[in-house]
Amino acid sequence: MSRNKSGKNPGLDGEIMITFTIYKVNKMAEVRTRFSPSPTGSLHLGGTRTALFNWLFARHHGGVFILRIEDTDRERSEERYVREIEESLKWLGLTWDEGPFFQSERLPLYREYIQRLLDKGMAYYCDCDPADLEVRRKEALARGDKPKYDGRCRERGLKAGPHSAVRFKTAQDGATRWHDRGKGPISFDNRELDDLVIQRADGIPTYNFAVVVDDITMGVTHVIRGEDHIPNTPRQILIYQALGAALPEFAHMTVTLAKDGGKLSKRRGAIPILAYRDRGYLPQALVNYMVRLGWAHGDQEIFSREELIKYFSLEHMSKSPGVYDEEKLLWLNSHYIKETPLPELARLLLPFLEGLGFKAPDLDYVARVAGTLNTRSKTLVEMADAARFYFADPRPYEEKGARKFLAPENAPRVEEIKKRLEAMADFSEEALNQLFQDLTSETGLKMVQLAQPVRLALTGKTVSPGLFDIISILGKEEVLKRLNLVLDFIYKKQ
RNA sequence: GUCCCCAUCGUCUAGCCUGGUCCAGGACACCGGCCUUUCACGCCGGCAACACCGGUUCAAAUCCGGUUGGGGACGCCA
């Protein structure tokens, strides 16, 4: 993957110490968070939620939110995923203040820091064969042991070589502990750790090392991430200490589980964040849903963006993982659909209508349509689907409804309604209501008996928005046309 | 297997830090009812939980220990 250098990227020009010092001196008071996805796949709900929490924390404190792309896995990183990540965050309104930075552009910086550890004797070269290591790991696991590197190259004093990786000399006794802002005190016995590879044989640093260097040089003050990173934290803390850098605050948030248990993942029902957009979800709904998964502010369910920023705090994160529940997301989505002003809703709905092949006369028409559907649709996709009859021939009529409401005895009633509509100049709600009221009292028929045949005629279905709204939106000409069509249908049946 | 984290309605959660006001509150879903030209919306009502065992205490959802259960991590992936 190649990318142009970003002018804002600190530490690129060999001024490692300078960059580092500047942040240490001037930026310590400012809150700086980052979101650092790897571009090896689509952004899903889990990762996006991490981004959201980091963004909220930064905004709450008037701090800085950094986007950093962790693309040190050259095999699997792809440019198109970088674009997808950016597009996803923008769609949700999670704008970043610095970056995107790319680890692949910061290689000289990492090399410099590796050298420092090497010089201090806190790291060493290792020429163990990866395939060999893999075998030993599997054996250990099969034996029921914890697979750990045995440190066989630790004291060999190897020099750099074409097949040599660099390992970090992990403390062999004592414990590493920190006060996690999400979980409370956490402690690891250092004997559980091993000498991890910090630079691959190809010269590219590994994740655990690159994050630390980046977080130090970018002045990140709060590392907010999924709890799957807890086991990495003691290793990273040891690296911070070896580098003589101050520790940031760590806050580990819960992961999101799939309905059947297990972390939500591509394999377990997670879909790309942009798929939510395509499925007719509103970004506010998704944001509101994600934040309430693992965070609460009393009993409040609905939050505006401003409220979120105002109330967000690490202290109110829950400690146990939450289960992804599409029903609740749908409820929030229908809520925000109802909240959205009609002209705006029309704008959002338009692409979905076009997707169905419909051509709307104008946005105003779509707004009127949306006004009849907004309490009946959980997604924009549903809404577009329910709007079909506003744009196309309603036939064929729903079979069951036709049997019941388009029987021969309905013909004279429809004829009568047609006649009266023809004579009407104004299709206002009151006028239409009056028309049907008159008919019920004159004929003794119930409203349903009059309404359903007309509903079938206009929409093709027995379920639809209010009849008067539909008549008014469709307009006289179209309504009469559809009533004639339904009369044909009834007569032909006999 | 080892290490780490966690444990309130089916689900998201409030309460837990600072024990009594909690025979546990809200929301989604579900079930009734009202409204009504259909379906929704809205409104009203209902069902439903402190995992278990011990300890501390006058008193425990709240503090402590254990058990069980769930999750995560054990890569020259991130």
Image (cartoon, rainbow, N blue to C red):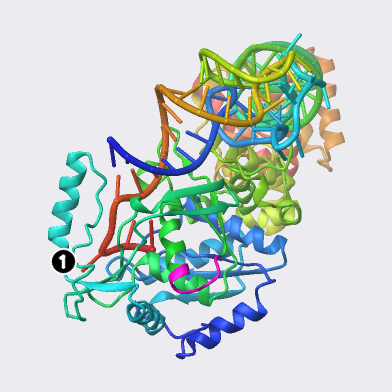
**Quadrant in which residue A289 is drawn:** top right
Apparent side of residue A86 relative to residue A367 in the rendered image (left or right): left
Q: Which residues are magenta?
A: A241-247
Apparent side of residue A436 relative to residue A31 in the rendered image (left or right): right
Answer whether residue A243 is magenta in the image. Answer: yes
Q: Nearer the viewer, residue B13 or A5?
A: B13
Q: Amino acid at mark 1?
A: Cys
Would you say residue A7 is visible in this rendering? no
Apparent side of residue A166 relative to residue A467 in the rendered image (left or right): left
Quadrant containing the N terminus of chain A is: bottom left
Q: Mark 1 sits on what residue?
A: A128
Q: Disc count in the image?
A: 1
Residue at 53%, 69% in the rendered image: A67
**Quadrant in which residue A416 is drawn:** top right
Q: Position of residue B39 (x, y in %)?
A: 64, 26
Would you say residue A262 is visible in this rendering? yes
* Secondary structure of the residue carrying numbered label 1: loop
Residue at 27%, 78% in the rendered image: A203
**Quadrant in which residue A143 is drawn:** top left
Q: Position of residue A441 (x, y in %)?
A: 84, 16
Apparent side of residue A265 relative to residue A67 in the rendered image (left or right): left
Label 1: chain letter: A
Main secondary structure of the magenta stretch: loop
Residue at 41%, 52% in the rendered image: A231
Q: Position of residue B57 (x, y in %)?
A: 71, 18
Answer whether residue A280 is magenta in the image. Answer: no
- Figure check: B19 above or below A49: above
Q: Nearer the viewer, residue A41 or A162?
A: A162
